[in-house]
Image (cartoon, grey):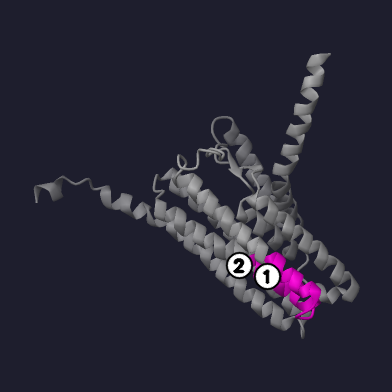
Amino acid sequence: MADEQNQSPHRGLKKGLYVIPTLFTAANVAMGFLAVLASIRGFHTSFTDPTLAAHYFDLAGLGIGLAILFDTVDGRVARATRTATEIGVQFDSLADVLTFGIAPTALVYGWAFAGVFTQGTFGHNLSVIFLFVFLMCGIFRLARFNLQSTRPRVLAEGTAKLDKKNFVGLPIPPAGGLLAAIVHFAPAPLSSYGERPAHYYSYALMALILTLAILMVSKIKHSSFKTIGSGRQSYVLILGLAAMAMSMFLYSQYALVVIAGIYVSHGLIWLIFRNISAKLRPSATDD
């Protein structure tokens, strides 16, 4: 009885804090689940009412976009409240498989490939293969991240050490988010553009999907933005977030594509810039 009386009154509150990140992860799962359902509805209505189909595809894309917000918040909340757990990491990764792996592939398949290519044709089979490669690379990316986060010493030999400032490889949320942003930019089914343009757009989309898959399993570093927001950077962060929020509210179709495209490409651009700088540096010293 004495031990029970001596327990801190904040102990129950501390336990309750562990639920908060889980709620955001559950919201992430809900958005992915609803995006899949909206993609199915969009595909079925694309043959009879392209306008209604565009509405469903747009809802699916926005759902994936909201899931990125929930996925970002749950990690920051867990770190801020010191409630990060190993099971939370696994739960978050399983949620990401659905929301940023299965949901974007279902959306792109219904919005583009299923209506453009007849089943069994070369284009249809190739699109299914590329979507499967995207999904598998995304799952591998999540598995590698989990190992680097929970067991960095095991992977220290021959593998890049865990870097809080950067992600090794393109994370799956921005990869799936870029596909969702493209659909949000032009939600009308690709089949409504005509046979020839739809085929061109579909093959270009396949090239993008393959590129995203390669970036996810690569070792190209992408900024995690986990360390910004302290000191003077906090003011810049607040202004930047406010500008992004306003642009997404007023011009979401353009802003989401631009933001997602910049993040996806910035790792590769920074790698090219570093390599060029490294080659120019010795020549400058020789002079």
Q: Main secondary structure of the magenta part?
A: helix
Q: Is residue 214 left or right of residue 147?
A: right
Tell me: residue 95, above or below residue 262.
below
Q: Amino acid at mark 1?
A: Leu
Q: In the image, which disc is placed on residue 107?
A: 1
Q: Quadrant of residue 67?
A: bottom right
Please state the horizontal and vertical placement of residue 114, each as a whole percent of the image. 74, 77
Q: Amino acid at mark 2?
A: Ile
Which residue is painted at 34% across and 55% down in the image?
Answer: 16
Circle 1 — which element? helix
Q: Which residues are magenta?
A: 102-131
> Farthest residue in the right direction?
196
* Residue 61 in sight from this viewpoint: no
Queried whether the magenta region covers residue 190, the answer comes back as no
Q: Nearer the viewer, mark 1 or mark 2?
A: 2
* Residue 102 in sight from this viewpoint: yes
